[in-house]
Amino acid sequence: MPDKSSGLVQGTLDMLILRTLALEPMHGYGIALRIEQISRGVFRVNPGSLFPAFRRLERQGWIKPEWRPTENNRRAKYYLLTERGRKQLKAETAEWGRQIAAITRIMEIVD
Amino acid sequence: MSVLRNLTSGLRTLFHKEEVEQEMDEELRGFLDAAMKEKMRSGMNHAEALRAARVEMGSVDAVKEEIRTSVWESTLETLWQDVRYGLRQLKRNPGFTAVAVITLALGIGATTAIFTVVNAVLLRPLPYPHPEELVYVQKNLPPPYGINPYAGNREFAAWRNQSRTLMPVAVYMYTWFDLTGGGEPERITCGLATASFFALLGVRPALGRTFLPQEDRPGGPPVAILSYALWKRRFGSDPSVVGRGVNLDDKTYTVVGVLPATFVIPDQYKIDYALWVPLAESETGAGPFRIVRVIGRLKPGIALRTAQSELDTIFQAILRGRAKMSIVLSPWQEQITEKFRLSLFLFLGAVSFLLFIACVNVANLLLSRAATRQKEIAVRLTVGAGRRRIVRQLLTESLLLALLGGILGLALAHWGKDLLVAFISPNLPALEPIGLDYRVLGFSLALAMVTGIAFGLVPALHASGVSLNEVLKEAGRSGAEFRSGMLLRNLLTICETALAMALLVGGGLLFKSFLRVRGIDTGFKSSHILSLTIDLTLSKYPTAKDQARFFQQVLKGIKNIGGVQSVGGSGCPPLGGRTNSQSELAVEGRSEKIPLTFVAKVSPDYFRTMRIPLIWGRYFGEGDREGSPSVAMVNESFARRNFPGEICVGRKVESWVRKNDWLTIVGVVGDVRSWMDREPDPEIYLPYLQAAEPYMTFLVHNRKPKTL
């Protein structure tokens, strides 16, 4: 994932995280791994972008952190999608669909 | 909701820093472990997996930094860091800090002090309920007279009866009474007010009540309201004073109330009213003409202009085209502060020049100092601080300086304010004590901030634009070329000099004007003149004849004192504080009346004593007395304005005391200036023997300056 200065890119990352968490709660690395795997390597999120994104989503009330114990007596921070997060995901998905359709239309005009 | 969450989360980070840091470490370590596990699953051994995972993650500190700066509390933290660093820097250079702070304090302090006055006079609303509704009625006389702050009782009565836009309409005026009984007789200034006056201002008496409408009419019961000061001084704060009688001009008035100590009329006249009696103006305004000050309260929802045209319409109906005047209505506060506005703003402007000079001065200092911090800044840039960060930090230092200067300046303003007020308060309207209120504090805080940015920004930008290469190359060499900002500093010095010059020139010009005013020809010679004013009590000298006779004796007596060269008397001497004027003076053979003329009753030798030159005709003589043909003298301005190109000696004007009595103008004298900033007013003089008043000022020209 390129730098996070582009607004669109940052928003997209947030949406991807929310989508990933819609399936099941996960910890940081799990989310990064899932995104990389499902996008077939197109998107590789580095922690420098990932963790600030977690903070953001947390502050917005869309995801909720939860410490869960792991083997070797440590604990890992898992994130859950909240109800509001679910609503937000739905809204963003719809918007994303709209944008994609629009871009596609424009790209198909130019010949 | 997210705002609250953001806030609480941020606060937790600030106050439980250790905990939050630990959690972050834990999470990142967990990330690393999970990455390692994944890599080992795909075939790497432990060491390879560890290295791969570490590379993937990058620098842990960098990640932590990213996380930290993504939230708002980090800005607060860096700000706090900057402040602490700035304070350390300032402490390390006490000399520089002291100079800068004192310079700023002087600039900010002076500006704040003037603003305190501006605030009290122009910005603070009048101390009455709904002060924005209070309006003041003035007359607009044809040029060159201009706006006159007095109206006549006739039009006041009409407005009181007919106005639908002002509720209520009230009058306040002043007069003098002799207060006797219960102490030394004293002559007091007393206020005349309509019953509506106190209601209009929303004043509640400390004792008793204010006037009732039935007391405020001709023939009504004589009642009075005491001022707090008089009550304390003369009646010993006696709580049972209500109902007692007080003797004014040998007539007993019943006290019905006492005003609170805080009652003061904040106008530009600053008269200290010892007590108040009803104006007692008739319903119709018939009866002797007197001038009054009319104020009113706009009915809610009524615009100023609407009220003004209503009053004007009523007024024109009374005038019936006899004179060209109109009505001007203004908000009372505006009317009071009108005269002071220009000079106060000039003052403020001048003092902000001073502040500007201080800013430029300190900016220059900062620039010089920045030159010595080159290395420090270069190193910080190298380590990775962005230019913005450096600018922010330098700006924080400047703001700190400005704040310190502001606090010191505020203290200076507070201590010096009494001095300032004492110096200029004769030129200000009567006010509640001028002091620091929240508006002034807000102003000086804002001023300090703006000042800080003003003088700090340019040096900060300049200093942070260091080229790393150059500076690091110079490491080792001492005092060689560096980014000296010579040009910029020279520019600032030029700026400062220019501003200082402007201030000096401005000050010089003002001073020159002041000297010129002093040197203006007043029209009379006041050297070797002593004055004595006598006010007669009406009870002892009820008629004009009695008064005239008394003054005649006084004049004769003074003349006989050795050393007296001549003595003259005038009811309204120049610069004597008393003026009488007459509007609508009828001239024989003309339909239009003269709108405004000032009147003085004088003795025959008055002009000679004051060395006012005779331009035409003759002076009054002993022959101009009761029973002789009525005469008058006028001054040059009167002749020029009303009889341009003609000879006015021999013309007649109508007496306003006795109708159908025509005064012949027998002489024209030179102008006498009553005001320094205006053209002399037209004046008409009457011999006191023909038109006496119960007061006169005697002007004695003595040969030997000491013995009298």
Image: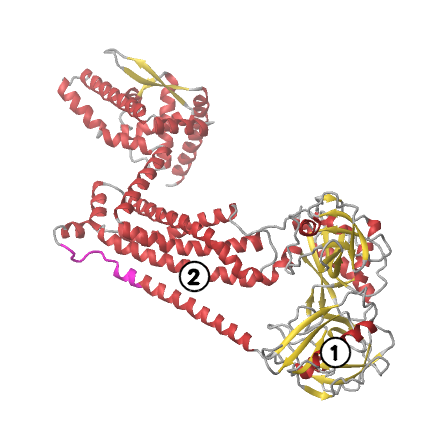
* Res B294 → quadrant: bottom right
* Chain letter behind tag 2: B
Residue B486 lies in magenta, yes or no? yes
Between circles 1 and 2, the one closer to the viewer is: 1
Please name whichever residue, B326 or A27, is drawn nearer the observer in this view of the structure: B326
Q: Which residue is mark 2?
A: B353
* Coordinates of residue B628 in the picture (x, y in percent): 85, 83
Which quarter of the rendered picture does the C terminus of chain B lie within? Answer: bottom right
Residue B93 lies in magenta, yes or no? no
From what the image shows, is residue B334 above or below residue B608? above
Q: Residue at x 85, y 63 (%)?
A: B287
* Coordinates of residue B359 in the picture (x, y in percent): 37, 56
Q: Main secondary structure of the magenta part?
A: loop
Tell me the crowding category of disc 2: few under 14, some 14 to 19, or many 20 or more residues within 10 angstroms, Cα based. Answer: some
Tell me the crowding category of disc 1: few under 14, some 14 to 19, or many 20 or more residues within 10 angstroms, Cα based. Answer: many
- Is residue B199 in view from this perspective? no
From what the image shows, is residue B95 above or below residue B705? above
Query: Colour scheme of this structure image?
Result: secondary structure
- Is residue B608 in view from this perspective? yes
Q: Are marks 1 and 2 on the same chain?
A: yes
